[in-house]
Image (spheres, rainbow, N blue to C red):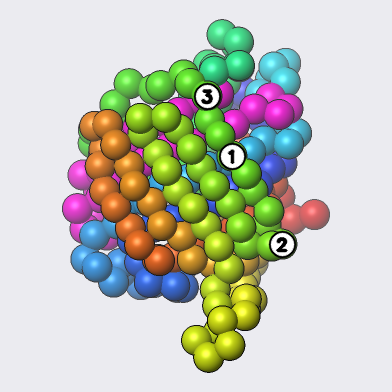
Amino acid sequence: MTSWEIKGRELVNCSCDYGCNCQFTGLPDKGHCHAVAGIQIDEGYHGNTRLDGLKVAAIFKWPAAIHEGNGEAIAFVDESADADQRNALLRIMTGADTDPFATMFAVYASTVTTMHAPVFTRIGLDLDIEGRTGRICVDDYIDTVGEPLRDKVSGEPTRAQIVLPDGFEFLMADIGSASTTTMGPVRFETKDTYGQFAHLHLNQHGTIKS
């Protein structure tokens, strides 16, 4: 197993209502899970390959709860990545160099039946975790907009967080609202559903508590 570590930021939008039952060992409230994710790697490596500044994204569709499997997915890797970086990112994203079920990459990969060929392209990411705003743009594939939750009376932004001390993706995430349209082989739309804004610190053994 090749050692790796990444520090970065993510925006995730799924089809669940705000809060997402999956974060509380529940079942998806729509009966299925459709999700998109964008990750900005601020610092990282895989073996001797540096990953600083690179971006990845993915689209997922599961017909029922994630753990029931039969998922469909497509991964996107920053077009600026060289051959070694592309290979490194794909190995991380597919859980190839990760302890079993130690990260979300490994967990999700184990539940995917149809994995489309990866796409190497420009990934537009604009992520403000504290402000709970973000955008994921992958031409011909993803258009996601995230924003803060808002008070129903005043319209002012409100803040809510989920803390998972033993989480396999994040230890704490700010929750917002997001809307997505996907194109290409894995298609769905969401409108004002669960948006997750988080700082990530992961390696082949899971989340790093620092």
Picture coordinates of residue 62, whole percent (x, y): 25, 50
* Residue at mark 3 to residue at mark 1: CA–CA distance: 10 Å
Where residue 78 appears, as percent x and y from the top left, is 55, 23
Q: Is residue 53 magenta?
A: yes
**Residue for badge 2:** 130
Q: Which residue is mark 1?
A: 125
Tell me which segment is drawn in magenta.
Answer: 51-78
The residue furthest front is: 154
Which quarter of the rendered picture does the N terminus lie within? top right
Looking at numbered disc 3 in the image, what kind of residue is underneath it? Arg
Q: Secondary structure at mark 1?
A: strand
Q: Nearer the viewer, residue 185 or 146?
A: 146
Question: Considering only vertical position in the picture, is 26 above or below 56?
Answer: below
Q: Is residue 55 magenta?
A: yes
Residue at left offset 42%, top offset 43% = 143
Q: Answer above or below: position of 179 versus 203.
A: below
- Whole-angstrom CA distance, mark 3 to mark 2, is 25 Å
**Do labels 3 and 2 touch, CB within 8 Å?**
no
User: Residue 97's spot in the image, x, y percent?
Assistant: 54, 29
Q: Is the residue 128 above or below the residue 184 in the image?
A: below
Residue 101 appears in view: no
What's the residue type where badge 2 is placed?
Glu
Tag 3, which secondary structure? loop
Q: Nearer the viewer, residue 8 or 100?
A: 8
Q: CA distance from mark 2 to mark 1?
A: 15 Å
Q: Earlier in the sequence, mark 2 or mark 1?
A: 1
**Corner quadrant of residue 4:** top right
Q: Provide residue 89's location: percent of width, then percent of height.
A: 55, 25
* Residue contact at pointers 2 and 1, CB within 8 angstroms: no
Residue bearing mark 3: 122
Q: Amino acid at mark 1?
A: Leu
Q: Residue at x 46, y 73 (%)?
A: 19
